[in-house]
Amino acid sequence: MEGKSVDTVEKVRGRRGMRRLSLVVYDLILLLIVDILILGVYPSREVGIPFADMVIHCLISVFCIFVSRCVARVYNQVWRYGDTAAYIRLLIADTVAFVGFFLLNTVLPMEKIEFIRIFSIVAFNLLLTLTIRLLYHYLYEYINMHPDSAGVVGKLFSLVARVPVGESVPKASESDKNRRIRIAVVGAGSVGVMLVREMMMNPRFAYIPCCFIDIDRAKVGRQIAGIPILSSEEATVEKLASLSIQEIVFALPKSTPELKKALYDHYKQTGCKLKVYDFPTMQTAGGGKRHLREFDIEELLFREPVAFERGMTDAYYKDKVVLITGGGGSIGSELCRQIAKMQPKRLIILDICENGAYDIQQELRIAYGGALDLQVEIVSICDREGMEQVFLRHRPDIIVHAAAHKHVPLMEHNCVEAVKNNVFGTLNVVNLCEKFNVSRFMMVSTDKAVNPTNVMGATKRMCEMIVLAHSRSGSSVVYSATRFGNVLGSAGSVIPLFKRQIMNGGPITLTDKRIIRYFMTIPEASQLVLKSGAMAKNGELFVLDMGKPVRILELAENMIRLSGYEPYEDIGIIETGLRPGEKLYEELLIRTEELRKTDDSMIFIEKDAPLTPAQIEEKMTILREAVATNDDNAVRDALKRTVPTYFSPEEVNRTAADTEEMKEAFGGKVQVGV
């Protein structure tokens, strides 16, 4: 097998060498023809140049031009893919050759020829050289795009260029041609043209471009690669239907979120599937390469991802022992990825769920190998003794507390467990931080802790009060908590649910079509936690400017359209009624008049007066007694006594239409029955 591989490589090299030699021979023939025309045929003298001197000048021209081109590696270029740089290199090489030719003509003992004659030889030869390369490039593309119609031209080209017709592109069968998806490309810039040329070069490609759509008046009405350019006004639903367009591809990598949303809203009316040809966003797979893809979940927000300055943050976590509770969860695992980049002294993943912890452990081991000191501890934060052993073993500098039960409906039916894990588990970690002199404790919180209407939100608000109270305990630990909204793609979030429902043919289920939520991506949430924790002085409750709230109904409709279906026709959307503890909206996190600014324009600090240790202990006593009854209703009542802002969802939803959040999401008008 090795012998065959070597033979194959040698054959390929041999073919390449023959093509390169053929090009040198063709260039030599062209130069000799030009020399004969300029030196022997063109009548610019009464007495012609002696034959011997004409031969010498021919040899000098060959020497100067080919030596210069070889030095410039002109013949190393694959001219079928020749770009501007390749042609510029050829131009520079021949300019150097002209200078050399002129100097040799001046100093060598032979009959001189005029400057204009030397210039004419080099310039005319360069023109012919460029011509055969451009012709070669054009024929190669044309014949590979139309292999069935190449005929005699294709065979002649194959013979002369020593390139078999369609050597890298198999012929498309009739069934392939009929199955090709007809697309319109929005954006006739370099990215759109790149996509179209790639499709046209391969007859087996699944797509066939039928038109460009662009707003540049200088381009509209013209063609690129034979593809017409329509204006956005011309690209009506009727026009696209007449062209049998099935998909519309956005090739606008630098478009703003506002423009992308406007285009999306406009073209989704066509009923065509919408795609993107662009660099992947956030953490989409692809390694930074362009590819044709579906809209990412993040793009449905139609806003720029929040980017945090990393310098100060990276420096803070470097060479520290960092322990992440809930490290195997959606947020916890991303926190592990982010911290691993910051070169910590040791990273400890702590979780009660072994599967998630194992997955992120293997991912980081593959990525960093032995360069990262990585440890995994399987223990519940409710297990005081087990947690104490972890602290004793690793002596962490920083605790990032992401462990919590977070599913709202489940916690409504498991109130005792919610308080045990979220409240008393957090208290365990806080007490151990003080016992082992941890430098910093950072808690991951949620927007559901703002005026909570459910058990999960109430427990997280109780955790915030515990953390802020301990910041005034006089210990050396620096405490902080960070709130953010719903995280796209996290376990149990609405996006994976909608995807599964669409894949199963629908319907999509919404608890209420009026529901709105604030969203952010997993990387955004993780970077927010780490940066706010690094900048914390003590006792701060950080919140992020989340932008505008998103209507879940609109999100569902967009996801259906992006999957190639029509809402309410192909995939239904039905209401199932609000779940226990669910409210129509989450509180607006950013009211700048009530918040303190930080150095980061996206991060604010809520003005929240901490309770005294005695007040916290009183609340904990009430919760301990309720948990001891093992009665969910008793625990729920205890939470209402300990968390003053905890209201029933019915109370909050009754006045939802009058809130700023709902008015902003619905453009000032909230239809109660929608």
Image (spheres, rainbow, N blue to C red):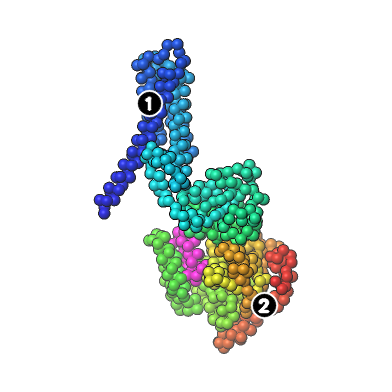
Residue 242 or 284: which is nearer the viewer?
242
Q: Image point 58% across, 49% down: which residue?
A: 212
Between tags 1 and 2, which lies in front? 1
Judge from the rendering whether residue 12 lies leftward or rightward of residue 230; answer left or right.
Answer: left
Residue 123 against residue 46 in the figure, above or below: below
Instruction: Report x, y in % for residue 474.
Output: 57, 70
Mark 1 crowdedness (10 Å alpha carbons): few <14, some 14-19, many ≥20 = some
Judge from the rendering whether residue 672 lies leftward or rightward of residue 79; answer left or right.
Answer: right
Q: Image point 44% across, 25% down: which residue?
A: 122
Region rendered in magenta:
316-345
Q: Residue furthest bottom?
A: 629
Q: Which residue is tagged 1?
A: 62
Mark 2 crowdedness (10 Å alpha carbons): few <14, some 14-19, many ≥20 = some
Residue 311 against residue 120 in the figure, above or below: below
Instruction: Report x, y in % for residue 146.
Output: 46, 46
Number of numbered markers: 2
Q: Quadrant of residue 97?
A: top left
Confirm whether residue 280 shows in the render: no
Q: Judge whether residue 561 is colored magenta.
A: no
Query: Quadrant where the N terminus lies?
Result: bottom left
Q: Quadrant of residue 508?
A: bottom right
Q: Residue furthest left?
A: 3
Q: Judge whether residue 335 is colored magenta.
A: yes
Instruction: Report x, y in % for residue 303.
Output: 61, 58
Q: Which residue is tagged 2?
A: 649
- Marks 1,2: beta carbons within 8 A: no
Amino acid type, residue under disc 2 in the picture: Pro
